[in-house]
Image: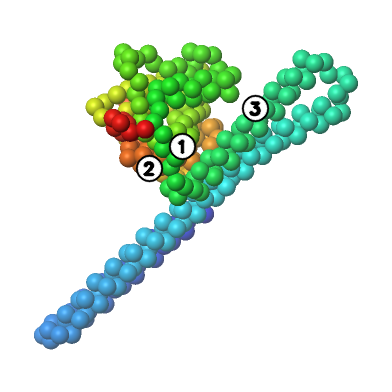
Amino acid sequence: MSVGPGRQGAIAFFVTFGVCLVALAAALNVGWIVLTWEQIAPLLVGVFVFAAIITGLILNTTFLVREVRRNEQHDAFVNAVTHELKTPVTSIRLHLETLRQRSASLDESKRQEFYGVMLDDTDRLLRTIEQVLRTGQAGRTPLHRTRFDLRELVAEQVALAVAQRHLSSDAVRLAPSDDPDPIEVFGDRIEIASAVMNLIDNGIKYSGERVDVEVAVVRHGRRAVVRVTDQGPGLPPDELRRVFKRFYRVPGPVTQRVKGTGLGLFIVQTAARRHGGRAWATSQGPGRGATFHFELPLARPGVV
């Protein structure tokens, strides 16, 4: 996430101010040592006080810089959510006004088209609201665990994503598997479905004009892994871990073009951890796509 000019100035001020205070404290401590080097007790007191002052200054500066960055992320999140809510609401209002004012002149096919657009916008609103709610409740709601076939759930989410985005069946596809047995996990079906859908949505959004996303479900020992591979802008190595942070979005022109809340991958990581799994990303670098992995433990035999 990029930091605005105002926030950059604030960060530079706090860092510079902290460095100046440390330098001043160091100078005072050196002077104290010179004056009291023959007196052991005052010397030791001065050294300990100096260490405490330096530690406090470093912690205070670190805290202030983190708060400035956190406020920047919150501002970006509010702006993103506002856009994600305002755009579909504006579209729904426009179509409703058209239906009310020109209802008599619209044929049935056009009316059905308007209804479809409004339903799509409503789905977009619900997805945004669900993301915000899930983030606010992350880690606090109880899990309703059941045993189910993970490959079957992923296939449902792929079909749902294709239908909601009006994509061709080969744009988002489930990779064939050589494993004929069900890949069963024991977990909260709704939460895992939400995590999988967020991964698929992420791949679709960052694919650009030509959507090419492959989803695979594989078994690795006692673990099940969902892999979502896109052909999008890819990720530099230092961003592979950061993308799972709450509100975080990779800085750059692609992120400015693709709207989002910065919550989808955080929800994925939270769901993985709550089920004893993990989430991570791999990429060969910018411009070469990325693969997001969602790992869960397999259901133990006899667990229902």
Quadrant assignment, res 302 = top left
Q: Mark 2 falls on what kind of element? A: helix
Judge whether residue 292 can be spotted in this image: no
Tell me which label, 1 or 2, sits earlier in the chain.
1
Q: What's the residue type where badge 1 is placed?
A: Glu
What residue is shown with label 1? 191
Residue 162 percent location from the top left of the image: 54, 20
Residue 163 percent location from the top left of the image: 57, 20
Q: Mark 3 falls on what kind of element? A: helix
The Cα–Cα distance between marks 2 and 3, rounded to whole angstroms, is 31 Å
Q: What's the residue type where badge 2 is placed?
A: Arg
What residue appears at the point 33 percent right and 37 percent down from the top-left corner? 277
Q: Which mark is residue 120?
A: 3
The Cα–Cα distance between marks 3 and 1, rounded to whole angstroms, is 22 Å
Residues tagged 1 and 2 counted as in contact (Cβ below 8 A):
yes
Q: Mark 1 falls on what kind of element? A: helix
Mark 1 surroundings within 10 Å by alpha-carbon count, few (fewer than 14), some (14 through 19), many (20 or more): many
Tell me which label, 2 or 3, sits earlier in the chain.
3
Mark 2 surroundings within 10 Å by alpha-carbon count, few (fewer than 14), some (14 through 19), many (20 or more): some
What residue appears at the point 44 percent right and 46 percent down from the top-left corner? 142
Using the image as rendered, state which of residue 189 and residue 168 is in the foreground. Answer: 189
* 137 relative to 118 in the view: left or right: left
Q: Which mark is residue 151?
A: none
